[in-house]
Amino acid sequence: MVFAVFSNVLEVDEQGRAVNDGDAQFRVAQWIRARQDPSYVVDLPFEPWETELHRADGRTTCGRAATKIRRGPPARSGFCCVNRLPGSL
């Protein structure tokens, strides 16, 4: 799940450079701490897109096809989901 959170939050520019690596690391740290410390409350609860797993066949764990680049909700939370490189899903 750590990899799913990191890769879904990470945003990549057209040259393949990470533009919000710190945000992705922070969300992973929150996920880990929430699993280890029952008293810890994540400040902005995880949205479904942040924890969604993607399979090698291009489908999500819920079975639907990932046919286009998916973007997260507006940046009201301060985090964006992955902006995949051209040609990859």
Image (tube, grey):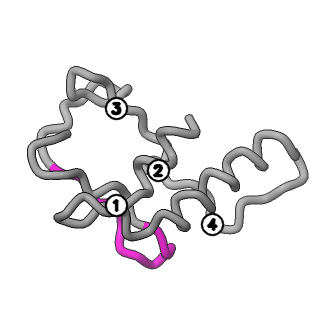
Q: Residue at x 31, y 63 (%)?
A: 17
> Mark 1 highlights which residue?
72
| Front label number (4 vs 3) | 3
Q: Earlier in the sequence, mark 1 or mark 4?
A: 4
Tell me: 9 left or right of 73.
right
Residue position for label 2: 50
What is the x, y in percent for residue 64?
Answer: 24, 30
Q: Position of residue 27 (x, y in %)?
A: 60, 58
The correct choice, above or below, for 56 with respect to 37 in the image is above
Asked if residue 37 lies left or right of residue 4, the reply is right
Q: Where in the figure is residue 73, as x and y percent of width and height? A: 36, 66
Q: Looking at numbered disc 4 in the image, what kind of residue is underneath it?
A: Leu
Q: Secondary structure at mark 3?
A: loop
Report the label total.
4
Q: Earlier in the sequence, mark 4 or mark 2?
A: 4
Query: Is 76 a magenta residue?
Result: yes
Residue at the spot 37% in from the left edge and 58% down from the top edge: 81
- Please provide the residue range marked out in magenta: 69-79
**Magenta-drawn stretch, dominant element (helix, strand or loop):** loop
Res. 32 image quadrant: top right
Return the residue at label 4.
44
